[in-house]
Image: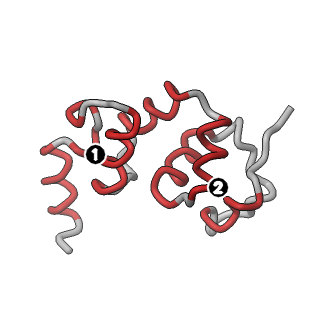
């Protein structure tokens, strides 16, 4: 059985047709997008739909989150900042070298 996005989250998936997105097939993509851009209703849906461990795993391994979002979610989930890849010093230096703005 496929799970689809709630209508409140459609606007965060501007690069695809959200009606066609199978959440169970692409959970990392969905979690990353909602961690970075989601509003309260879409984040509530994410927290109810995905296990906390899966959300934490995406947060710890993702390179697509901004430091601001990653820091917020690390605090919310009770994770050590050092365990979050996009908050590590080496990643921050690499990110600044690629996009210095």
Q: Residue at horizontal 79%, vertical 54%?
A: 20
- Quadrant (top left, top right, bottom left, bottom right) of the N terminus: top right
- Quadrant (top left, top right, bottom left, bottom right) of the C terminus: bottom left
Image marks 1 and 2: residues in contact by CB distance under 8 Å: no
Q: Residue at horizontal 17%, vertical 70%?
A: 100
Kindly state the secondary structure of the residue where label 1 is placed.
Answer: helix
**Mark 1 packing: few (<14 Cα in 10 Å), some, or many (20+)?**
many
**Where's residue 60, x and y in %?**
36, 34
Closer to the camera in the image, 73 or 10: 73
8 with respect to 15 (left or right): right
44 with respect to 75 (left or right): right
**Where's residue 78, x and y in %?**
34, 31
Vertical placement of 14 versus 2: above or below? below
Q: How was this image coloured? A: secondary structure
Q: Which mark is residue 39?
A: none
Q: How many marks?
A: 2
Vertical placement of 99 versus 40: above or below? below
Q: Residue at horizontal 66%, vertical 45%?
A: 45
**Where's residue 46, x and y in %?**
62, 43
Marks 1 and 2, the one that precedes in the sequence: 2
Residue farthest along the bottom direction in this orientation: 101
**Mark 2 packing: few (<14 Cα in 10 Å), some, or many (20+)?**
few
Closer to the camera in the image, 37 or 48: 48
Vertical placement of 83 versus 40: above or below? above
**Where's residue 22, x and y in %?**
75, 44
The residue carrying mark 1 is 86
Q: Which mark is residue 41?
A: 2
Based on the displayed image, in which of its 4 quarters is residue 66 positioned?
bottom left
Based on the displayed image, in which of its 4 quarters is residue 47 positioned?
top right
Vertical placement of 67 versus 28: above or below? below
Based on the displayed image, in which of its 4 quarters is residue 16 positioned?
bottom right
């Amino acid at each position: 059985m496929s799970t689809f996005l709630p209508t409140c989250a459609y606007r965060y998936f501007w690069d695809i047709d959200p009606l066609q997105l199978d959440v169970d097939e692409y959970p990392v993509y969905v979690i990353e997008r909602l961690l970075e851009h989601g509003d309260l209703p879409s984040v509530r849906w994410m927290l109810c739909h995905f296990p906390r461990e899966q959300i934490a795993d995406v947060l710890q391994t993702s390179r697509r989150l901004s430091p601001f979002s990653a820091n917020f979610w690390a605090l919310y989930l009770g994770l050590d900042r050092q365990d979050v890849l996009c908050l590590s010093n080496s990643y921050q230096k690499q990110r600044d070298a690629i996009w210095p703005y």
